[in-house]
Image (spheres, rainbow, N blue to C red):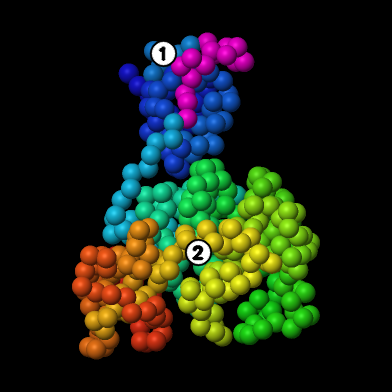
Amino acid sequence: MFKTITVDELKPGMYVQEILEQTGNVKIKNQGKVTSSAVVDRMKKQGIKVVAIDPSKEFIPLEGLGDASEDLEEVREPVEQVSFDNEVTKAKKIHDQGKGIQKRLLDSIARGLPVDISIPKEFTEHLVGSIDRNPNALMCLTKIREKDSYLLEHSLNVAVILANFAKFINLDEDEVLELALSGFLHDIGKIKIPDEILHKPGRLTDQEMVVMRDHVYYGIRTLNQMEIPERIIRTVGEHHERLDGYGYPDGARGDEISFFGRMISIVDTYDAITADRCYKAGMPSQKALKILLQDSPEKYDRELVQQFIKCVGIYPVGSLVKLNNEQVAMVVEQRDDQPLKPIVKIFYSIRGGHYMAPKTVDISNSQYEIEKAVMASEFGLDFNRFFSEKIAI
Ligand SMILES: [Fe+2]
C-alpha cells in the first residue's frame, strides 16, 4: 500500500514509489531510495511537491556511506513539443501571471517588505517550460504592449527573449533558468526611482540620468538581501555595462563584463528600442537589430549580436507583415531554411478594412509573398485586443 506525502514530510530511509506533483522541467526518476537529506534537498530544489512512498521498502539510511545504488537520480526528460495553437492559451496565462508577480514584487520592494524569491523563481520555471514546449507562443506575447505597463512588460519580455536566446545558443537548462530569472529581476531597482523621472515622457536631462542610473545599484542591493545565486546578481548588475567602458554603474570594459552580462545588455536594449512608450512608438525589430549591429563590437559583443539576429530572425515571431494580397498577418513560426518565408496567421484585410478569422499559412508553401514588415499602428489596428480575443482564447 503506497502513502501520499509532501516533500516536506520526506525523510532519509523512505522509498519513493512515484513523483506525484512537480514543477519545472528536470524530472527525477520515479522510484528510488532516499539515502540522505541531500537527496531530499535536491528534490525540493527540483520543484518536487508531492510523492507516493512505499512504507514496506523503508530502510535504515547510512548517510555518507555511499549506498547510492538505487538512489533517486535526475533524468532530463525531453519536453514534449506542442503546436503554437496548443501553447498560446497557456502562454497567455503565464504572461498575465508574470505581470502580476512583477507588480507584487515591485510593491513589496517599494514598501520595504521582505521578498519571497521562490515566487519569481517558480514563475520563471513555468516560463521556461512554455518556451521548451513551444518558444513561439510567449515570443508572440512579447509584442503585446500596453503603454502604461512598460516596467512590468519590459522585465517579463527580457526574461522571455533572454531565455529564448540562451536556448538558441544551446546553453544548458540551469543557465537558461538563471538568465530567465535575471531578466525578470533586472530592473527591480527602478521602483526606487522617483516617478517624475521614471515616467518622464521624453529624454532625461543629464542630472535626471544620474538619478536613473542608480536603479542598478538599488537592484543589486535588494537582491543581495535575498538568497539568490551570485551569478544572477552579477548579470543584473551588468545589464547597462558596455564593452567600451561607457556603460554603468562601474564602467566595466571588455572581459570585465561576464558572458551573461553581454547577453542581457543586448536583449535589454532590443526590447527597450522596440517597445511602445507613452511618448513614442516602438521601432520595428529590424531597426533595433541594425542599431545593435552598428554598436558592435564597440558596445555589444559582435558574435553574440550576430547570434541574436539569427535567433530573432528577419521577421520575428509576433511581428506583423503585409502580404502581396493586401492582407496583414502575424508571424508565428520561423523556418531555419527559409528565413524570408515564415509561417504566419493572416488576420486583417487592408482592402476591406476589417479583421478576418485567423488563418494559418506557410508562406513557403503558398501563393502568398511577404511584401514588408509593418506596424499595427499603420492600419489603426488594435492588435493587442485582437490577439487576446481571437488568437489566445
Ligand atoms: Fe535597466
- Distance of mark 2 from mark 1, alpha carbons? 54 Å
Q: Nearer the viewer, residue 228 or 106?
A: 228
Residue 371 visible, this angle: yes
Q: Is residue 346 left or right of residue 41?
A: left
| Residue 159 in picture, x, y percent from top left | 53, 58
Amino acid on which the number 1 mark rests in the picture: Lys
Q: Which residue is mark 2?
A: 309
| Residue 39 in picture, x, y percent from top left | 54, 25
Q: Earlier in the sequence, mark 2 or mark 1?
A: 1
Density class for disc 2 (Cα within 10 Å; few <14, some 14-19, many ≥20) is many
Q: Which residue is mark 1?
A: 57
Q: Is residue 354 magenta?
A: no
* Corner quadrant of residue 386: bottom left
Please tell me which residue is depicted at 52% across the width and 35% down the height of the picture.
Answer: 44
* Corner quadrant of residue 207: bottom right
Please tell me which residue is depicted at 60% across the width and 15% down the height of the picture.
Answer: 63
Please tell me which residue is depicted at 57% across the width and 62% down the height of the picture.
Answer: 305
Which mark is nearer the camera, 2 or 1? 2
Q: Dot 1 lies on which element?
A: helix
Amino acid on which the number 2 mark rests in the picture: Ile
* Corner quadrant of residue 239: bottom right
Q: Nearer the viewer, residue 364 or 168?
A: 364
Q: Which residues are magenta?
A: 60-74
Main SS of residues in magenta? loop
Quadrant that contains the C terminus: bottom left
Above or below residue 132? Residue 296 is below
